[in-house]
Amino acid sequence: MITSLSIKNYALIEKLAIDFSKGFSIITGETGAGKSIILGAIGLVLGKRADLTSLKNKEEKCVIEAQFEIGKYNLKDFFEANDLDYEDDTIIRREILPSGKSRAFINDSPVNLQELQDLSLYLIDIHSQQQTQELSDESVQFKIIDAIANNSEIIAEYQKLLKSYKSDKSKLSALLKKQSDASKEQEYHTFLLNELVAAQLKSGEQEELEADYEKLNNVEIIKESLDKSLAIANEEQFGVFHNLNEIKNALQKVAPFSPEYQNLFERITSLTIEFDDISKELENCSEKLLNDPAQLELINQKLQLIYNLQKKHQVSSVDDLLQIQSDLGNSLLELDNMDEEIASLSKIIEEKATELDNYASKIHENRVNAIPNLSAQLVAILETLGMPNARFNMELQPSETYFQNGKDELQFLFSANKGTDFGLLKKVASGGEMSRIMLAVKAILAKYSKLPTLIFDEIDTGVSGEIAIRMGEIMKEMSTTMQIFAITHLPQIAAKGDSHFKVSKSTIGDDTQSELKLLAQEDRIIEIAQMLSGANISDSALNHAKELLN
């Protein structure tokens, strides 16, 4: 439960520190005094978003800190899962800086808003007038029934499986589309693949073919050049080889006279050997060189095939064509394997659908068993709240659709009077009736919830007199198992509280401030008397206030 709240520089509050106790606490005050500011501050602690309008003084930061006693609520696993320090008396602090940035801390460990919001689900339920209207929403009605049916764990398992099921359905849909698209292109891709395979391409082939083509296409020029080179090299009297030998013989004679001459002799000897080898290779090349028009045509055809394929596929090398050939082969192989993959995934989806159906059936069965119990409890409570003829008709209709909470559709029908037909809550229930129904729902849920604190924000809208007294008694009864706050304008409810806080607003110079004060018994009598008769308190109002408190 919340044990203390401190607020600094928030809205109309300059500085406030207040302690709370267990049981039933009342908060009263005139309209506009700042009750919504208190709720807003608690909302910030619980993870609601904030902006600079929250700051009273725009030059200073806003700090809101709340202490919660959580030792009885088995939250150690949550703290461990979120890597937070656990304390039985946990402190949550929220800071809003003048820059607009916001910071949050749990036991001095920095956290993000999502972590605050997750923790808040275990700490406080703030019931607003808007929430009363949401009672007409089917999802809210299901949450009520499922709480009574103890469906939380099975719905969690169902939702986990449903997420996996939907993911597989999306994969299957993508596979089927891919298969459909691939099938349309399969014939053309097969043609392209066969064309590339028939070309019998090899890496590096293009460069070799182009070199062979240049050689055969210029055979006469090459032959003439080679033969001329051989003639110059080997001419008997004036050939290069003859002259090299003459130089070598001359240097051989002087080589012994100096290392320098010896070096020149060795170099010319090496040159002679190298030139002799070149001459032999020239002769070999000349002998092998043949004019072969047929081979030239074959090479030309293969090159033209390569060039045409490169142009078609918009690439510049044989390696690129080989990669395309590999990709096409893999694509067609993947298409062949796709049928098997689709069949396997379809089987998995079918098995998950069966498991989902089993979960949904169990959820439905639990709801069917819970509805009479819920209906009976609602009717019993509403009878004490001045609605003796209230009746509910909650009809579950099985559906083929997988919803987030099962496969049921719900008709949550209500009749307040004898002789009237059942109708949808939002159409047949008045504002006062909706308030009483919601209080009855909260009273029932309190028995099944381990929530520490519940705050009612003017749940008494549209009621008065004896009904207000009974509403106060119900909240008082609820406070035996959880901490209850009621923001109210009704003295009948205010008198039922164990403690009573008043929100007031005052003007000091040009500044307006709100404050929250715990009322002593005498102040409480005066406050309730004012709620009964207004600012001019009569003796009758004072006596009535004392009677209500007693």
Image: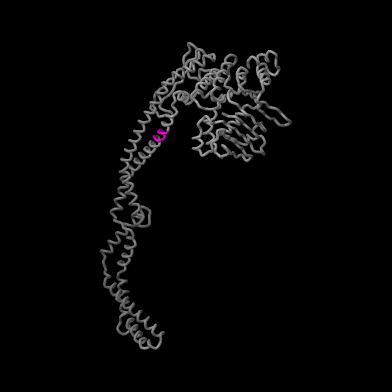
Looking at the image, residue 125 sits to the left or right of residue 278; the answer is right
* Between 418 and 75, the one nearer to me in the picture: 75
**Visible in this render: residue 157?**
yes
Main SS of the magenta segment? helix
161 in the magenta segment:
yes
Q: Quadrant of the C terminus?
A: top right
Looking at the image, residue 3 sits to the left or right of residue 247; the answer is right
428 lies above or below 199? above
Residue 155 in picture, x, y percent from top left: 43, 29
Looking at the image, residue 37 sits to the left or right of residue 71; the answer is right
Q: Quadrant of the N terminus?
A: top right
In which quarter of the view is residue 514 placed? Answer: top right
Residue 5 in picture, x, y percent from top left: 61, 31
* Between 510 and 478, the one nearer to me in the picture: 478
Residue 523 in picture, x, y percent from top left: 68, 21
Question: What is the magenta range?
Answer: 160-165
From this viewpoint, which residue is outermost toward the right?
509
